[in-house]
Image (spheres, grey):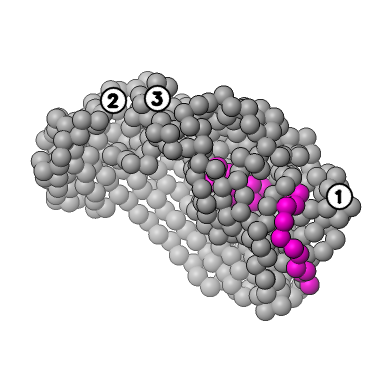
Amino acid sequence: MLTRDEAHALIKKITSLADAEQVEAIVGSSSTNSTRFSGNVITQNVGLTNQSLRLRVINGKRQGVASVNQFDDESLKRCAQSALAVARVAAEDDTMLPLIDKQPDYTPVNSWHESTAKFTPAQRAEAIGTVLSDYDKRGLEGAGIFDTDEGAVAYGTNTGVFACQPSSKAEFSVSAFLENGSVEGWAESSALDVNKLNVVDAGQRAAEKAEKSVNAKAIDAGEYTVVFEPAAIAEIMLFWGWLTANGLAFAEGRSFHRGELGQQILDKKLSITENPYHPELGGAPFDMEGFPTQKVELVKDGTIAAVVHDRRSAGMCGQKNTGHAAMQPDARGAGPGALVVSTGDSSTDEMIANTERGLLVTKLHYTNVVNQQEVSITGMTRAGTFMIENGKVTHAVKNMRFTQSLLSAFANIDAIGKEAHAGGGALFGGNFVVPAMKINKWRFSSPTGF
């Protein structure tokens, strides 16, 4: 991983090589280290290092972009020449914004931990071995992955802007299987500091889910009260962020807001904040325009309070830039990257105890968008779905497909968990701190048959 000084020197070199009015460089470097396991044995141990530089030059109303992943002098010269060549033939863009000037000091974010960066393959194997030894005794087959990663991103311009943010993350994800893989339980643990992972606990939770999922019963489609565990809520929040917090979609009238904020349409128990400064998320304090990233309260006590912006969308709708720009030029618009859901006053056990009839859902799978303006998604349950009857979990349920508007779902919140956990958005990734949540009238459209 490049150090701050190395990234700064590299950006100074490439911006001096590009003979343009304005020059922007974004440097990324990463080290990804993974140990995979399946059938109760470690099957793969890999380490991947990567580095990249993205150069954007601006002359007048024209811009050009080029990238390179080798940093020798000749490669950097070719990258600069390529970006300049693109700018010469590019169409003029009257909406293009100039680069910003040097900013005040960025708020520090403690997102890199030496313990994670120096965690060894042997240490990952030892932790995995503890889980798999238990699975051997219980007649379970375990499969999953243990990652310990580090990286850094740096942004700089010839207008005097420079910012650099290192980060680290450790993730352990495990599936426990019974009956030749037809029954699955799953759990995960993630943290910026690997010492805060609880691998054994995740292994135990996955095992218990699998053991309780034997002899799952099919149920009819329809509306159910659902107790969603944090991993399922993280998946839901990924799509909530995409569909409701994009500043460009808001400015262009493509989102459910239809240009209006301040709508009190969700349950008052719900508050959602975009917070890259949360200690469990470790986001960057700057965006890809070099602007300081702001903490933004998106939903306040059930009221739609804000969206996130880059300079373009902020200017389009007369709001403040919140520092959420992606790499420019960008057609998607600003979006959140560190969503935090406020906690409530119920434990998961209390949510179950207060449910006459409903479902307990571990996680969601193959989730995708149905309708952007209705904020509706579809997907299925996976790796642990259970019937709740008269305040108790009574039996496993075969997985169900759902089609649900999140506007309707978040208007029907019954309870929110008192503890929040860091987690990702499964297939599409993401960073979230979320509690469990009990939602009434969640619509399941059909059984899946497994």
Q: Which residue is mark 2?
A: 100
Q: Secondary structure at mark 1?
A: loop
Residue at x-position 18% and y-position 38% = 63
Which class describes the residues within 10 Å of circle 3: few (<14), some (14-19), or many (20+)? some
Mark 2 against mark 3, which lies toward the viewer? 3
* 150, above or below 398, in the image: above
Q: Quadrant of residue 217?
A: bottom right
Is any atom of residue 193 visible in this view?
no
Labels 1 and 3 touching (C-beta < 8 A): no
Judge the density around disc 1: few (<14), some (14-19), many (≥20) Cα neighbours within 10 Å.
few
Instruction: Determine if the magenta segment contains residue 349.
Output: no
Identify the residue at horizontal 76%, vertical 64% (top origin).
219
What segment is highlighted magenta in the picture?
215-240
Identify the residue position indicated by label 3 in the image: 317
The one nearer the camera, 168 or 83, is 83
Q: Secondary structure at mark 3?
A: helix
**Residue at 79 percent of width and 42 percent of height:** 347
* Residue marked by disc 1: 356
Q: Left of 265 or right of it: where is 370?
A: left
Q: Earlier in the sequence, mark 1 or mark 2?
A: 2
Left or right of 293? Residue 61 is: left
Residue type for callout 1 = Glu
Q: Is residue 30 visible?
A: yes
